[in-house]
């Protein structure tokens, strides 16, 4: 018996939530213990795929957003020593689950094959087991609710959306932070202006809130460049007379 269209939609919804949380999980985990793990991640890529990856990075795509489940499966399979928190039996299943999820997602989204009820249940089961294994209890509950046609939860009922800058003067600064993975970044005024290829306005020196981390996202595009990438200003030293100084940004955990 094949699944109905509403089940297909629920499967895609669950997959998108799962995919987003797993990318965040692996990125945060590796950032905390393996400083240069991007090289490890793309190590198995063939030359053409590696060139595409590097071109995407140069074009401003973030490492996190380029992570695919199939590539992640190879990374886990080839670097099991980086995951001591998992027992070997569970760790050996991770790559198989991820590859199957990616393939089924592609098949379902493009209506290539009919999915049976058993496959539908197995996919959801694998997502839930994986979510529990990585300690994502809310993800587990949300996937379970989606499977059963119930509404799913969010951590904040009124989340603040920090949209990145997509055009204008501060786009180069947005591109800079999109590519950054360091825990702390210290930039001089000169370095920031070199990134922008433009001078900062007088308000950047005269008004302390210009460098704030508040929620005035519509009227302060410069703030969106760092806040949308989970950075906040933690220190600043500005000299208006000499048009100099430095700013310290820190990654919010």
Image (spheres, rainbow, N blue to C red):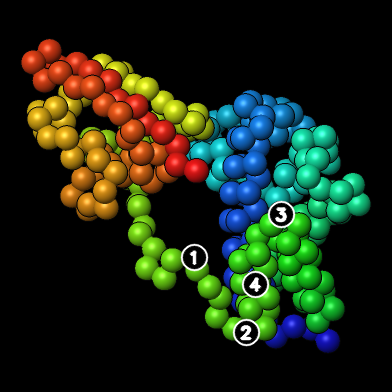
The correct choice, above or below, for 225 with respect to 17 in the image is: above
Residue picked out by circle 4: 141
Up the image or down, 55 lies above or below 97; here it is above
| Residue 149 - label | 2
Residue 222 relative to residue 3: left or right: left
Q: Quadrant of residue 72?
A: top right
User: How far apart are the alpha carbons under marks 4 and 3?
Assistant: 13 Å
Question: Which is more foreground, mark 1 or mark 2?
Answer: 1
Secondary element type, mark 2: loop
Question: Which residue lies at the image location 23% right of the left edge and 18% below the top edge?
Answer: 245
Query: Label 1 to label 2, Cα distance in Å?
Result: 19 Å
**SS for tag 4?**
helix
x, y (%) of residue 9?
62, 76
Q: Nearer the viewer, residue 105 or 112?
A: 105
Identity of the residue drawn at 78% across and 70% down? 125
Separation of marks 4 and 1 at Cα, in angstroms:
12 Å
- Per the model, the C-alpha gap separating discs 3 and 2 is 24 Å
Residue holding disc 1? 155
Residue 134 numbered tag: 3
Q: Residue at x 37, y 31 (%)?
A: 249
Q: Residue at x 23, y 36 (%)?
A: 211
User: Does residue 87 appear anywhere in the picture?
Assistant: yes
Q: Is residue 87 left or right of residue 215?
A: right
Mark 1: give few (<14), some (14-19) or many (20+) Cα within 10 Å: few
Residue 188 vs residue 248, the one in the foreground: 248
Q: Which tag, 4 or 1, sits closer to the chain's start?
A: 4
- Mark 3 is surrounded, within 10 Å at the Cα level, by few (under 14), some (14 to 19) or many (20 or more) other residues, namely some
């Amino acid at each position: 018996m094949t699944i109905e269209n509403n089940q297909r939609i629920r499967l895609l919804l669950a997959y998108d939530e799962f995919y987003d949380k797993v990318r965040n999980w692996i990125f945060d985990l590796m950032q905390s213990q393996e400083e240069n793990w991007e090289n490890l991640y793309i190590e198995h890529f063939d030359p053409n795929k590696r060139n595409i990856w590097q071109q995407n990075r140069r074009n401003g795509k973030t490492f996190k957003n380029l992570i695919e489940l199939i590539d992640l499966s190879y990374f886990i399979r080839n670097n099991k020593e980086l995951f001591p928190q998992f027992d070997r039996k569970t760790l050996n299943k991770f790559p198989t689950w991820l590859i199957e999820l990616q393939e089924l997602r592609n098949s379902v989204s493009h209506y290539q094959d009919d999915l049976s009820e058993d496959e539908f249940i197995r996919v959801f089961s694998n997502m839930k087991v994986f979510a529990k294994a990585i300690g994502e209890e809310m993800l587990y509950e949300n996937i379970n609710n989606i499977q059963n046609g119930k509404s799913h939860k969010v951590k904040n009922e009124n989340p603040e959306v920090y949209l990145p800058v997509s055009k204008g003067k501060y786009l180069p600064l947005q591109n800079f932070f999109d590519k950054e993975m360091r825990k702390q970044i210290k930039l001089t005024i000169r370095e920031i202006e070199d990134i922008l290829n433009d001078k900062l306005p007088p308000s950047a020196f005269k008004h302390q809130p210009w460098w704030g981390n508040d929620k005035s996202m519509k009227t302060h595009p410069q703030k969106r460049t760092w806040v949308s990438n989970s950075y906040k200003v933690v220190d600043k030293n500005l000299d208006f007379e000499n048009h100099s100084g430095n700013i310290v940004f820190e990654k919010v955990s």
